[in-house]
Amino acid sequence: MTENYPPAPRIPLDPIPFDIVGFDLDGTLLDTSPDLAAAVNHALALAGRPALSPDQVEPMIGGGAKEMLRQALDASGGCAPEEFRGYYKEMLRYYEAHVADLTQPFAGMIDALDALAGQGVKLAVVTNKFESLAVKLLGLLGLLDRFETVIGGDTLGPGNAKPSPAPIIEMIARCGGGRAVFVGDSIYDIGAAKAVGIPAIAVSFGFLLGPVEELGADAVIDHYDALLRTLAAMAGQD
């Protein structure tokens, strides 16, 4: 005989003390390293250079596509400026065509976004990736509609990508103002948040250059399962 049990009571979530939660994209929301490595290797092949593994490319991600390719070429002898422009154009062309081939959300990320949205928190993306590529990637993965705004490294013009405070200020304005926090995996992310004076959370599973503690974030999470309780614990922190 089958017995019917009442559903387990829902455990109430602690209120989130933020109106806005902003996220970096590469290495924070998404593991984009396989597709970025493929694009870099496309350019390296054109230059007659050896390919790099995703693990080798990961530390080069965060400062934008141009800086990523420059570091990749520097690893095998550098490149003349006029040649670099051609390789850079080819890398972007390849990446745009393969932007979501192998990219995956980090574990628990979608559930965390849903839980935040369920509490009325506005979500945003601030990335140093070109805005058009970020929007395309999020759209192909079915994630774009979850975000109030997407701000790219080129959205506000030259000199206004992270670690400049400008894109974080713009994020807050586009989300209607209120108390904000930023989640990222690099010095660009934490530096931009600190420049605005908002709390920052670092993810230990991102594309790190060293120990995550050295980023100077206000908190660190090892999995998205910890994001909501970490945010709740930051009540009163400015």
Image: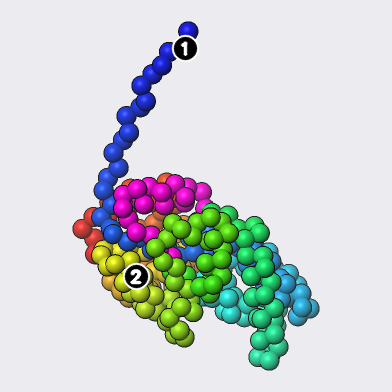
* Position of residue 30 in the picture relative to residue 97 (left or right): left
Q: Residue furthest top?
A: 1
* Position of residue 133 in the picture relative to residue 203 (left or right): right
Residue 238 position (above or below residue 225): below
**Residue drawn at 28 percent across, 38 percent down:** 12
**Residue drawn at 58 percent across, 80 percent down:** 66
Amino acid type of the residue that numbered disc 2 sits on in the rendered structure: Arg
**What secondary structure is marked by label 1?**
loop
- Does 108 appear in magenta? yes
Q: Which residues are magenta?
A: 106-125
* Position of residue 8 in the picture relative to residue 142 (left or right): left
Which labelled disc corresponds to residue 174? 2
Question: For residue 54, what is the image quadrant?
Answer: bottom right
Residue 7 position (above or below residue 41): above
* Residue 113 picture location, percent across and down: 41, 52
Using a 10 Å C-alpha cutoff, classify the residue at mark 1 as few (fewer than 14 neighbours), some (14 to 19) or many (20 or more): few
Amino acid type of the residue that numbered disc 1 sits on in the rendered structure: Thr
State the residue in front, 167 or 187.
Answer: 167
Structural distance between the alpha carbons of marks 1 and 2: 53 Å
Using a 10 Å C-alpha cutoff, classify the residue at mark 2 as few (fewer than 14 neighbours), some (14 to 19) or many (20 or more): some
* Residue 33 picture location, percent across and down: 60, 63
Contact check, label 1 and label 2, Cβ < 8 Å: no
Which labelled disc corresponds to residue 2? 1
* Residue 129 picture location, percent across and down: 53, 72
Which labelled disc corresponds to residue 78? none
Q: Say if residue 55 shows up in the picture.
A: no
- Does 79 appear in magenta? no
Question: For residue 5, what is the image quadrant?
Answer: top left
**Residue drawn at 39 percent across, 63 percent down:** 148
* Residue 235 picture location, percent across and down: 23, 55
